[in-house]
Amino acid sequence: MADPARVKPVVGVSEAPAERPTQSEGSRDAPGSSGKVSEPAAVQSTTREQGKARSAEEAAAAGEEEDGSSSLHPPPAKKLKVEHDKKKEKRHKVDEDEIQKMQVLVSSFSEEQLNRYEMYRRAAFPKAAIKRLIQSITGSSVSQNVVIAMSGIAKVFAGEIVEEALDVCEKWGDTPPLQPKHMREAVRRLKSREQVPNTKHKKILFH
């Protein structure tokens, strides 16, 4: 027969209630709950990425359309700049052509013609006298650029008179050098062709 003192502790041990798992262990052992919580977050992140990709594509398409429209219809400032560059290139090309033509012409000069051309290039009106004349007429001071321009215009005007005077001398059967009568006749002819400004004031009676 068993000793009751020995059996009693065994029964107490076997009848002891089992410990309940803590809340942390239950939440740790429930995989379904963690999966349900993380699934909407993944969907939201995917939606955000798709939205960013779409916005990037739309921005790129808009940029391409703007580039295409700007190339077809450039802004006024850019258009003016392009036109100015084209005019500058055209002017530079014309200057180069003129220089080449002048080089060909000078290379075909005789020795006498070359000497005359060199004297023509060296000849110039004194700028101080031109400045005094302009100031005496206008009554105000002028810049150096105006003096240079007027000096060049006066040189061209004198060259036209001399050229016309040489034609008069040849037509009259005279030989150079030119005489005052040749110069006066040249001025008269230029005035008749209205190539010389008339300094005399004419009173107009009827308009």
Image: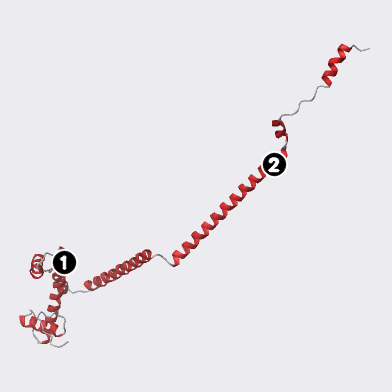
* Most foreground residue, 88 or 30: 30
Mark 1 sits on what residue? 146
Amino acid of disc 2: Gly
Mark whose residue sits in front, 2 or 1: 2
Kind of residue indicated by mark 1 = Val
User: What element does badge 1 sit on?
Assistant: helix
Residue drawn at x 64%, y 48% is 43
Q: Earlier in the sequence, mark 2 or mark 1?
A: 2
Residue 158 in picture, x, y percent from top left:
12, 75
Q: Which mark is residue 82?
A: none
Is residue 102 among what the camera can see? yes
Query: Seen in the image, is 31 located left or right of residue 123?
Result: right
Question: Residue 197, position in %: x, y?
Answer: 14, 79
Residue 175 seen by the camera? no
Q: Are the residues flagged by discs 2 and 1 in contact, CB closer than 8 Å?
A: no
Label 2 residue SS:
helix
Residue 129 falls in which quadrant of the image? bottom left
Name the residue: 30% across, 67% down: 92
| Residue at figure coordinates x 14%, y 75% from the top left | 157
Q: For the point 26% across and 72% down, which residue is it?
A: 101
- The residues bearing labels 2 and 1 have C-alpha atoms spaced at a distance of 91 Å
Q: Quadrant of the N terminus?
A: top right
Residue furthest to the left: 180
- Horizontal side of residue 50 vs 132, given as left or right: right
Q: Residue furthest bottom?
A: 206
Task: Return the mark for residue 35.
Answer: 2
